[in-house]
Amino acid sequence: KSLEYLRRLKDADVILYVDTHGYFDYDDLYDFQSLVRQIVFAREWFERLKENAESGQIDKLEAGAWPYGKPPYGYGKKDTDDLDDKLYLKSGYEEVLSEMFTIYQDKKTLSDVSDVIDDQFDVNSPSEWQVGNILENRICVGELTLTGEVVARKPELAVVDKDTFKKV
């Protein structure tokens, strides 16, 4: 991959410059070797960082924690420490989240769902984006995912059954 990347740069007439080296000449053996070493090394470190980040996210998800920053609408996380950001369903939101699915099946628009929630419940009204996110987020069936794969099942987070989720 690294050599292919360098070939594409050369074919595109990209001129590479590094402050400590100067301009790189693709046809000079020393420059080419130096470039290859740096690119391979950078790619290796990038892959290590990516692997470790994914591993950390999986560890948190398996523990029922939320590794992605702010949790979805209606959910919260206990910020007791960095390793224990336990996800929980906020008080008063189970019915709201469940109702979102029912309303959407009837009304079919995100704005209608947001408006009905605002009218019928005493909670912070969700934005259309938040409604769309909830309707597609597997957390509503108690599944914590990473890149589409279920990492952990937490039934206490479920607000709808899988059949209702699939219908929407």
Image (tube, rainbow, N blue to C red):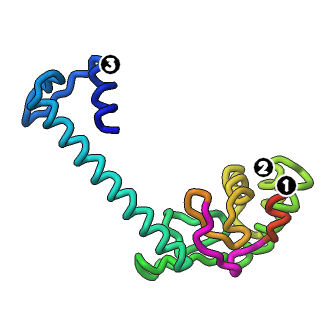
In the rendered view, does 67 fall on the left or right side of 91? left
**Magenta span includes 29:** no
Between disc 3 and disc 1, the foreground one is: 3
Q: What residue type is labelled 2?
A: Leu
In whole angstroms, how far apart are the C-alphas of marks 3 and 1? 50 Å
Q: Is 105 in front, or is 59?
A: 59
Residue topped by disc 3:
12
Label 1 belongs to which residue? 104
Instruction: Please give the range of residues in magenta.
Output: 149-159
Residue 114 placed where, x, y %?
A: 77, 55
Q: Position of residue 162 (x, y in %)?
A: 80, 67
Binning the other alpha carbons within 10 Å of mark 2 as few (below 14), some (14 to 19) or many (20 upward) gives some
At 84% from the left and 65% from the top, the residue drawn is 163
Q: Quadrant of residue 134?
A: bottom right
Is residue 157 a member of the stretch shown in magenta? yes
Residue 19, position in %: x, y?
10, 34
Give the residue type at disc 1. Tyr
Q: What's the residue at 40%, 62% (across, down)? A: 53
Nearest to N terminus: mark 2 or mark 1: 1
Check disc 3: other Cα within 10 Å, few if <14, some if 14-19, many if 20+: few
Q: Name the residue under label 2.
A: 110
Task: Give the residue drawn at x 39%, y 60%.
Answer: 51
- Are circles 3 and 1 on residues that touch, CB within 8 Å? no
Q: Does residue 100 appear in this view?
A: no
Extreme right residue here? 106
Real-space CA distance between mark 2 and mark 1, rounded to the nearest whole angstrom: 7 Å
Amino acid type, mark 3? Ala
Place of residue 44 in the rendered image (x, y in percent of width and height, measured from the top left): 29, 51
Q: Is residue 69 above or below residue 16?
A: below
Mark earlier in primary sequence (2, 3): 3
Q: Where is 32 relative to 86, above or below?
A: above
Q: In which quarter of the image is the C terminus?
A: bottom right
